[in-house]
Image (cartoon, grey):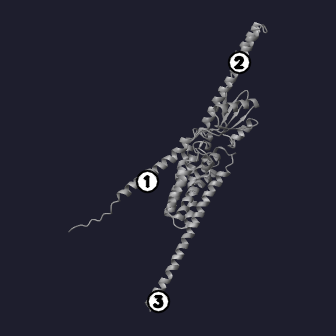
């Protein structure tokens, strides 16, 4: 007895090669999206505050313009207290206090890159102070020697002046960390590492709810439940367990939950509106656009062009900024980040309703078209 084997037709050669090329292009786009911000970023427009005597401030800013043109955005403040306030409100990433005891103020909680830049500023300031003092010492020695040679100054007095000038040393520039990282995350590794998993977490929630839950109200209930449970759970892990987040637990939980909801709701809403292609749209917005522009590991000013500020209007950028502000910069205004996340979450919910009512309209129209056919058929049978 012969057996009949049914096999599916082979994929055409052209289609096979085309799929392979398309896959390679997709991988290339993903890699480009992740490495582009880091490879094209430059130190520019780094906001710092400066306070001190007018002549000292002018000399310092002139030195910056000469050696680091375009790298710093300098704001002059009245005193050290104002410089500290500017840092705590995130109007400045660091500050320089010019006085007899020069000081550089940093905020390592703002990011390791910020702290590294201010360390370079401290080194440059130390060189400038040392050069200025050294020049003054050499000038004093030269004047004393010239006065002695001209008979205007006794040798003993000239020698005393020279010895006194030679003993002068440049003051040491001190560095003070105004907003340090927590002892539980001293290098900021945990905070930086948590940014990407949160992006993936929001996507996972959106994809699962889109595929496994049917009905607009059930999807919204699932989104709300997911945001609450995941928000509390992730905050417990990041704050209670590892000490990555600081500050008020409940407020952090709300921020984490809203961040996840903002990503998940957009995916659910896009799926309700255009079908499963909406999942790809959500991934595109979050992974290929929002995440590379989030400035999670560097100042947003360092990204090319206007991409830094633009990135703050996407979920990854807004959530990273919000959690950093809540943990370390409570005096900074976080209103923009709250509004951005809320807007994305609301947009996803609105899309869900639009998709729901559009589906209802299609079903209603199809039913209306089929009714006369059924009636006519029954009439014919009766006849």
Return the mark for residue 379.
Answer: 3
Vertical side of 260 occupied by 272: above or below? below
3 to the left or right of 123: left
3D distance between C-alphas at marks 1 and 2: 69 Å
3D distance between C-alphas at marks 3 and 1: 55 Å
**Residue at 75 percent of width and 9 percent of height:** 148
Q: Secondary structure at mark 3?
A: helix
- Residue 324, percent from left and from top: 62, 45
Return the mark for residue 137.
Answer: 2
Q: Which residue is mark 1?
A: 22
Label 3 environment density (alpha carbons within 10 Å; few <14, some 14–19, many ≥20): few
Mark 1 and mark 2 lie on one chain; the one further toward the N terminus is 1
- Residue 321, percent from left and from top: 62, 47
- Residue 20, percent from left and from top: 40, 53
Query: CB atoms at circles 2 and 3 under 8 Å apart?
Result: no
Q: Which residue in the rendered view is the most extreme toward the left?
A: 1
Whether residue 101 appears in this view of the structure is yes
Whether residue 53 appears in this view of the structure is no
Vertical side of 123 occupied by 295: above or below? below
- Residue 309, percent from left and from top: 63, 48
């Amino acid at each position: 007895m012969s057996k009949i084997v049914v096999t599916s037709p082979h994929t055409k050669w052209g289609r096979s090669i085309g799929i392979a090329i398309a896959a390679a292009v997709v991988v290339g786009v993903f890699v480009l999206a992740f490495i582009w911000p880091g490879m094209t970023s430059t130190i520019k427009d780094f906001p710092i505050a400066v306070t001190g005597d007018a002549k000292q401030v002018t000399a310092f800013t002139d030195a910056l313009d000469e050696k680091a043109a375009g790298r710093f955005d300098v704001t002059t403040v009245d005193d050290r207290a104002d410089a500290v306030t500017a840092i705590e409100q995130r109007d400045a990433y660091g500050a320089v206090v010019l006085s007899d005891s020069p000081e550089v103020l940093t905020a390592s909680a703002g990011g390791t890159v910020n702290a590294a830049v201010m360390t370079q500023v401290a080194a440059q300031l130390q060189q400038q102070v040392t050069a200025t003092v050294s020049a003054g010492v050499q000038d004093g020695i030269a004047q004393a020697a010239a006065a002695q040679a001209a008979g205007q100054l006794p040798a003993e007095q000239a020698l005393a002046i020279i010895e006194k000038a030679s003993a002068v040393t440049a003051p040491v520039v001190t560095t003070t960390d105004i907003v340090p990282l927590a002892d539980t995350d001293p290098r900021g590794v945990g905070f930086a590492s948590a940014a990407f998993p949160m992006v993936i977490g929001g996507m996972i929630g959106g994809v699962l709810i889109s595929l496994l839950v049917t009905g607009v109200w059930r999807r919204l209930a699932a989104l709300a439940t997911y945001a609450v449970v995941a928000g509390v759970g992730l905050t417990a892990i990041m704050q209670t367990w590892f000490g990555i987040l600081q500050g008020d637990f409940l407020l952090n939980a709300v921020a984490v939950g809203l961040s996840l909801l903002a990503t998940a709701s957009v995916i659910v809403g896009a799926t309700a509106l255009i079908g499963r292609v909406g999942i790809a749209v959500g991934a595109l917005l979050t992974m290929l656009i929002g995440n590379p522009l989030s400035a999670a590991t560097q100042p947003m000013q360092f990204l090319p062009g206007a991409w830094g500020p633009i990135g703050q209007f996407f979920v990854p950028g807004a959530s990273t900024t919000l959690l950093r502000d809540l943990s370390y910069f409570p005096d900074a205004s976080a209103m923009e980040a709250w509004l951005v996340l809320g807007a994305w979450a609301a947009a996803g919910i609105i899309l869900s309703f639009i998709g729901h009512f559009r589906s209802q309209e299609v079903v209603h129209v199809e039913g209306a078209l089929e009714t006369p056919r059924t009636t006519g058929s029954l009439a014919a049978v009766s006849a």
